[in-house]
Amino acid sequence: MSEGARNTRQFFAASTSGSGSSSATYRDGGGGIGVARASLVNTGILDENVLALVFRYLNFDPKALCTVSCVSRRLRAVAERVLWRELCVSRAPRMVASLAGGGAPPGRVVGGWPALAKLLLFCCGAAAAAVRGHFTGVSRFSKTSGRSFLSRRCRGDLLYVSDPCEHAVHGADDDVGAYRGVFRGFTRSRTRACLVGRRAPLETRVRCPYCGARVWSMVAAGMAPRSACRRLGAHEGRLQYYVCVSGHLHGNCWLARLTSSDADRDADSEDDASTEGGDDGAHVAP
């Protein structure tokens, strides 16, 4: 090819394919048409490592992560696969390590990382008491508390449950507590086996606020132990909680007023729990 022919190459168009590569067609001096390709997979801002570094600098701000997930399908895929997971690990590393070791595929949790991140940071409120959901400040999840929500035959399951988020209700004497939690390996849990064995119906009007899946009412299924009310400091018979098919738990209760003697007793038991079970809990801050 002559020097003049080389200099007369003209690029007519450039496009990016769905696989992330770009191509350009050109015509050389001899009338031939060629195609030049260059891979753009994970380059620039789409590089997962670059995004992880940027959001680590932002302390994995959940609102910024939500915004980025809405930009494009590719960014949403990276967020769901990497960034939401990193947010969960940064907030509750021991809890996430335990959940990820519950038989889920490597690097995954049942229900997905976005749902777990929402559960860590978002209180779903209580629809029956007109309490709206909101982002929480600091949340504590404990598997010690989780045992109180399991019937005797299901005590071998591992469940993390948050402390109740207290809300004052206009016109009511008592406060409403909203709480949430998550099972490890729920698909193989004794709790799920009991629900299926009892043919407990799935609720028609309630959905999981974290992953959108259908839920069972543990109260309607007769699987809500009295120990849950005692653990939450709630009135007997004024507690409701649901478990979805992915293993997320949410519920609410009417909290009983504490007397001075009750408060002292609770403070003593809380000191004992914090001394004994450093590995049992996870503190989550946004």
Image: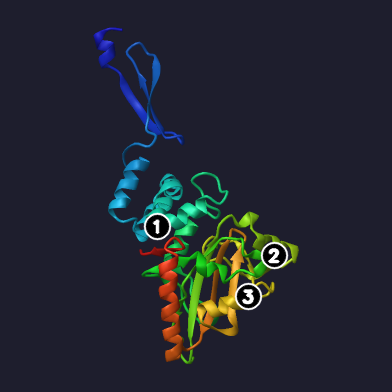
Residue 133 or 33: which is nearer the viewer?
133
Q: How is the image coloured?
A: rainbow
Badge 3 amino acid = Pro
Q: Reading the chain from its start, which is encountered first: label 1 or label 2?
A: 1
Q: Which residue is mark 2?
A: 195
Tell me the amino acid under the disc marked 1.
Cys
At mark 1, the secondary structure is helix
C-alpha separation, residue under disc 1 versus residue under disc 3: 37 Å
Going 43% across and 49% down the picture, which residue do you hit? 76
Q: Nearer the viewer, mark 2 or mark 3?
A: 3
Kindly identify which residue carries mark 1. Answer: 66
The circle drawn on residue 225 is 3
Snapshot quadrant of residue 284: bottom left
Q: Are marks 1 and 2 in contact (CB under 8 Å)?
A: no
Q: Nearer the viewer, residue 227 or 113?
A: 227
Q: Is residue 168 visible?
A: no
Estimate how packed mark 1 is, as few (under 14), some (14 to 19) or many (20 or more) residues with alpha carbons within 10 Å.
Answer: some
Tell me how far mark 1 sits from mark 2, CA to CA: 34 Å
Q: Earlier in the sequence, mark 2 or mark 3?
A: 2
Taking the image as shown, residue 154 lies to the left or right of residue 15, namely right
Location of residue 160 in the rendering, given as x and y in whole percent from the top left corner: 51, 64
Find out whether the residues at labels 2 and 3 contact each other: C-beta distance under 8 Å.
no
Residue, far top: 2
Which quarter of the figure is the C terminus placed in? bottom left
Q: Position of residue 25 (x, y in %)?
A: 38, 24
Q: How many residues crowd mark 3 within 10 Å: few (<14), some (14–19), many (20+)? A: some
Q: Residue at x 39, y 14 (%)?
A: 32
| Element assignment for label 3 | loop
